[in-house]
Amino acid sequence: MAENFDDTIAAISTAMAPSGIGIVRISGKNAFAIADRVYSGKKGKRLSDQKQYTIHYGYISDNGKKIDEVLVLVMREPHSYTGENTVEIDCHGGVLATRRVLEAVIHAGARPAEPGEFTKRAFLNGRMDLSQAEAVMDIISAKNDYALRSAQQQLSGSISEKIETVRQKLLYETAHIEAALDDPEHISLEGYGPELRMVVEEQRTEIRKLLQSADSGKLIQEGIKTVILGKPNAGKSSLLNLLLGEERAIVTDIAGTTRDVLEEQINVRGITLRILDTAGIRNASDKIEQIGVNRAIDQARDADLILYVVDRSVPLDQNDYEIMKLIQNKRTIIVLNKSDLDSEVTEDMLKEELASHSELTPTAAHPGLTSGVEHSGGQRETMTDSAGLHEHVSNSAGLSETVILNLSAKEKQGLEGLEKQIEKMFFNGKIEFNDQIYVTNARHKKALEDAENSLDYVIKSIDDQMPEDFWSIDLMGAIDALGRITGESLGEDLVNEIFAKFCMGK
């Protein structure tokens, strides 16, 4: 998809804020000529005469008036980020100085770049495929170490290589079918169905491996949506403040202080948590408070993780029972709060109530949550460690996990155990990046799902002994879907839409 561009673009590639250095980037066939009009070096040499990958000291001027003292980098096509002649001007940081340099470059003949246009040109000039181009923006917007490492892997071509391997194998089989259909006298498809079925199954397995990583990839990229639930005054806002390490939420003895959803973002052991503190769950007479309760319930339904805060100094009541129904089939950590006070609620009480309000059917031998006992809906295992972890509950589908642990938000005790459990619950305590590829892009996931569906149809057509034309049509559907990930089969409108999401100067 290589393409020549007649115009030369320029933009500020650093943040518009006070800083040590500001960078103005110029890219296009006239980049050197434009730079020569604004740059003057001490030795009087033109930038267009300088060697590749060299740095030069001088000044930027506009209409003969010096603007700033700069360093200028020279990169010649095709050995630059965009694949075009490129000049980068390193000036003094700050909003005014950097903007004045950009204005000088535009006065000299450059056009202001559109958002993402530098990376778009890199893609169109074959410097990177589309998945690598999207990884550039993922690196810029990475919220944690895992997201950054995942984006770096994708930029290095990890997903591209895997997709291209699968795609080439499917292309080979498609070409064989098409050749046989065009020349049946010399190429036979006799007995080819079982052989093709084996190849398709192998490639479908590879696609499914990538799809299995998508849920974890989404959490790595976007963060874990974590909703704090509980009755009024259970200590939800205190827990939020403890996690944040600052007094962000108002904490009082008055029930119903929190009336709306308060969202914050924190980094826990390299994992981003999008934490939502919610109104206390109760049947409120106050109309405004009830709206807050309804919002809390709505957020809980869409949560990746629920932190259910229980005040151990107050007996369980109907509000707790409603919450227990709400957390079914959800990853949940029950925080038994206020461990510094006398206990009205014990872990055993919670286990029994959870069992009675769950969809699981306890065994006659033990009606509570027991270790290693399988029920109709799943299995339980008891876990104990120094962090105060006591019970782990999960169903066979992996949709529901419940852990009970002790914590005192007031005394700031038990936070480490909570952080460890969050890491363990989502990533088994760690994320491996040696061989694991994580699909973090929703567009990639959809394309993989489409490719998987097409291969399902191929297998069905073979099993149903359909004509070979059907095999080829669905194989091409899978190939096209995979090509959408790397940019091999994309319309111009979608390309423009993708790069419009990029930031200026990149």
Image (cartoon, grey):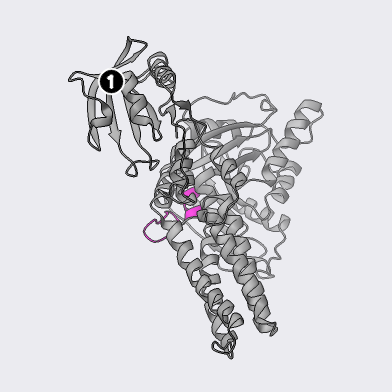
| Residue at image location 45% in from the left, 35% down from the top | 506
Image x and y of residue 51, in percent: 22, 36
Any part of residue 396 in sight: no
| Vertical placement of residue 104 versus 197, above or below | above
Q: Nearer the viewer, residue 48 or 149?
A: 48
Image x and y of residue 250, in percent: 59, 23
Residue 193 figure quarter:
bottom right
Residue type, mark 1 in image = Val
> Is the magenta region chiefly helix, strand or loop?
loop
Any part of residue 186 in sight: yes
| Residue at image location 43% in from the left, 52% down from the top | 154
Q: Nearer the viewer, residue 196 or 186?
A: 186
| Residue at image location 45% in from the left, 63% down from the top | 162
* Residue at the top extreme of this rendering: 65
Q: Is residue 427 magenta?
A: yes
Judge left or right: residue 414 versus residue 194.
left
Judge left or right: residue 185 versus residue 363.
left
Q: Mark 1 points at which residue?
A: 70
Q: Does the magenta stretch include residue 207?
A: no
Per the rendered image, the range of residues in magenta is 422-436
